[in-house]
Amino acid sequence: MEKIALITDSTSDIPKDIVDKYNVNVLHYRVIYKDREFIDGINVDSKYIYDNLDREIPTSSLPPMDEMETLFSNLQKEGYTHAIAITLSGGLTGIFNGIKLVSENYPGIKTYIYDSKSISAGETMLVEECAKLIEKGVSFDEIVNRLPSLRKRLHLYFVVGTLEYLKRGGRIGKIAGSIAELLNIKPIVAVDVNDGKYYTYDKVRGRKRSLNRLIKIANDILRTKKCRMAVMHGCALEDSKKIFDVIKKNSNVVSATFGGNISPVSGVHSGPGLVGLVLFEEE
């Protein structure tokens, strides 16, 4: 009989109630300052990151290999035969390879690592869909085969307050980012489903117009699809709440989650002012 474990990482912003309900295992990134180090979402919160950005911009690192080793060792002791890991987009991180290396030390656990080509609530929605399938008794192989079709139903877009932090982290080109800043262009950013990197979905001038464009994108999708919705933010509570309140009124929104701040390690790379929208199409 199959016993399937679910694994994700701290950039998924997965809520505690989902972790507890489905026994999801979360690997934690690290936030690193010159003289101190924090565990993402455990002993540091997003507010701390944003409050200190003017003094020092930290770096980030993958969940340590020993944390992964401990996880797989515990899964083995608990009798798990299979594991499905849903990770942050591979175009933004090397966690996929890290888990793969460790999982090879545990041949008794058949492990499948799926690159979500997403982040934050996008990751969480894929994890939750897998959890529901496990709960229904769907086999490991069938869940693995379904993951690409689940990903096709996922839409993620966000805007940031400034492009400075995406530039510093190499997430966008420095020249293009600098020109956009000078022209007050606020791009709508999405994740490329092919290479998993950020790309400009649309260009809008000014903060207000960019937020209105997010609403239009949502309503265009919701015109023909019923969706679950989640809104996340990075030190942009007021703007994100406005977006949330407008979009959730659409009759094709079947459920709406206001997720709050993104993980600290994500905030390092996006900076303050992020407003993110995730839609997941219902079948």
Image (cartoon, rainbow, N blue to C red):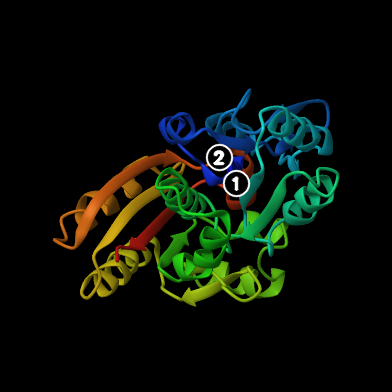
Q: Are marks 2 and 1 in contact (CB under 8 Å)?
A: yes
Residue drawn where x is 33% and y is 49% of the image: 239
Which residue does the numbered mark 2 point to in the structure image? Answer: 263
Q: Specify the amino acid type for callout 1.
A: Ser
Q: Picture coordinates of residue 196 (x, y %)?
A: 63, 68
Which structural element holds mark 1? Answer: helix
Q: Residue at x 46, y 29 (%)?
A: 20
Relative to 56, residue 223 above or below: below
Q: Is residue 156 above or below residue 1?
A: below
Element under disc 2? loop
Residue 258 occupies quadrant = top left
Indicate the amino acid at tag 2: Ser
- Closer to the camera, 129 or 52? 129
The residue wearing badge 1 is: 266
Residue at the limit of the structure toward the top, as seen here = 43
Give coordinates of residue 210: x percent, y percent: 37, 66
Give the vertical position of 219 relative to 64 (above or below). Answer: below
Q: Quadrant of the image for the C terminus?
A: bottom left
Question: Could you classify mark 2 by the number of other residues whose Cα lies within 10 Å: few (under 14), some (14-19), or many (20 or more)?
Answer: many
Residue 149 — which label?
none
User: Is 161 on the left-hand or right-hand side of 269?
Assistant: left
Q: Position of residue 86 (x, y in %)?
A: 59, 52
Quadrant containing the N terminus in the rendered view: top right
Judging depth in this view, the residue of 173 and 92 nearest the camera is 92
The CA span between labels 2 and 1 is 5 Å
